[in-house]
């Protein structure tokens, strides 16, 4: 009997606990495949003309991002330079993805359609893969982000546009449901989150049920306009200080300086805060020349 996503996490945990590779799986062949995947990643990172391309224009991977972000990208505005530690974070995420796919195969689940080309209303992208025949995306996330996958509330707080991204991949395949295999990269916990357009009783249904073709057409129309779209989100209060800080969505955006030219950064114990309005000067170090 073929396996399904319903036992995926349990099967991977069992594999890690007992090191019992699933029947009909050739572990040596899978280890070789994983090694080749690592070499391919490193070639893309470090060999000339083999690296990641800075793709301009619309892509399904970013179709869920706010209109203004996509407008900046489409019109080739210059964003922030990517810092070295951010490149390391991206590389780490790619390594985790390959590691998880290795564990999926070793636990007896089937991985197909890796990096398959998808298209919705003329906009293209590449899916991560299908596991056991179902469209799925692999996500390595913080402990905070992992909670949204674990409890299923991603659809209500999706600053990076993960919902529309994978919904588009599924739609291009004629499918009405899609899933995420998420890993808490700090603790190693795994979970699978599935959203299904035919499950109208799902508590998150109204948050993930927008028609993806309408979404794509709306983004296409928005980015072609001469005027930049409205702000993605407004700054939020920074505690009771009276200061305003950028939302999570805006703090990660490479174009934030175009929206907030007077933005200031401060090194708090819990991480960097981007303050757009200062009423009370923070009693922490200001970071300069990094925006």
Image: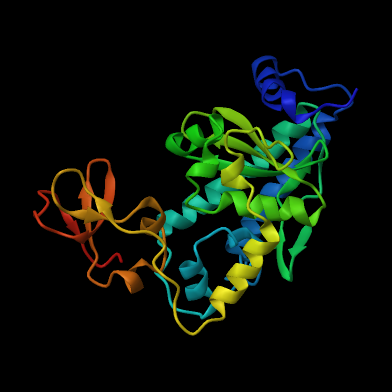
Residue at x 65% of width, y 38% of height: 99
Q: Is residue 171 above or below residue 219?
A: above
Viewer-nearest residue: 11 or 215: 215
Judge from the rendering whether residue 140 lies leftward or rightward of residue 242; answer left or right: right
Left or right of residue 137: residue 140: left
The colour scheme used here is: rainbow
Please state the horizontal and vertical placement of residue 137, each as a whole percent of the image: 66, 45
Please state if 22 lies on the left or on the right of 192 as rendered. right
Residue pushed farthest top?
A: 18
User: Looking at the rendering, in which quadrant would you find the N terminus?
Assistant: top right
Q: In this view, does 280 lie above or below 145?
A: below
Q: In which quarter of the image is the C terminus?
A: bottom left
The residue positioned 72% from the left and 66% from the top of the image is: 124
Q: Residue at x 22, y 70 (%)?
A: 262
Residue drawn at point x = 23 percent, y = 41 percent: 269
User: Viewer-proximal residue, 156 or 149?
Assistant: 156
Q: Position of residue 175 (x, y in %)?
A: 79, 47
Vertical position of residue 113 compared to residue 80: above or below: above
Q: Where is residue 200 in the image (x, y as percent from the top left)?
A: 68, 37
- At which x and y percent is residue 149? 55, 35
Can residue 61 be seen here? The reply is: yes
The residue positioned farthest toward the bottom in the image shown:
226
Image position of 253 with respect to 155: above or below: below
Residue 53 visible to an observer of this rendering = no
């Amino acid at each position: 009997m073929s396996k399904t996503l319903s036992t995926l996490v349990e099967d991977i945990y069992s594999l890690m606990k007992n090191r019992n590779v699933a029947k009909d799986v050739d572990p040596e062949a899978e280890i070789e495949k994983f090694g080749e995947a690592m070499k391919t990643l490193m070639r893309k990172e470090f060999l000339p003309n083999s690296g990641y391309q800075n793709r301009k224009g619309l892509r399904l991977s970013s179709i869920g991002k706010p209109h203004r972000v996509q407008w900046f990208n489409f019109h080739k505005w210059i964003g922030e330079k990517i810092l070295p530690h951010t490149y390391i974070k991206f590389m780490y995420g790619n390594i985790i993805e390959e590691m998880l796919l290795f564990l999926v195969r070793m636990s007896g689940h089937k991985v197909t359609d890796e990096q398959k080309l998808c298209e919705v209303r003329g906009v293209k992208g590449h899916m991560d893969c299908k596991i056991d025949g179902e469209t799925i995306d692999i996500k390595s996330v913080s402990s905070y982000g992992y909670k949204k996958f674990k409890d299923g509330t991603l659809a209500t707080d999706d600053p990076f546009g993960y919902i529309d991204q994978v919904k588009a991949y599924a739609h291009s395949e004629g499918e009405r449901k899609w899933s995420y295999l998420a890993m808490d990269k700090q603790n190693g916990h795994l979970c699978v989150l599935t959203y299904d357009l035919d499950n109208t009783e799902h508590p998150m249904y109204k948050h993930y049920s927008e028609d993806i073709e309408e979404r794509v057409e709306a983004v296409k129309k928005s980015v072609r306009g001469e005027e930049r779209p409205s702000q993605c989100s407004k700054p939020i209060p920074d505690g009771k200080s009276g200061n305003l800080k950028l939302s999570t969505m805006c703090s990660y955006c490479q174009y934030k300086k175009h929206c907030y030219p007077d933005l200031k950064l401060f090194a708090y114990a819990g991480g960097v805060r981007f303050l757009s309005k200062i009423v009370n000067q923070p009693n922490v170090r200001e970071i300069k020349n990094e925006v």
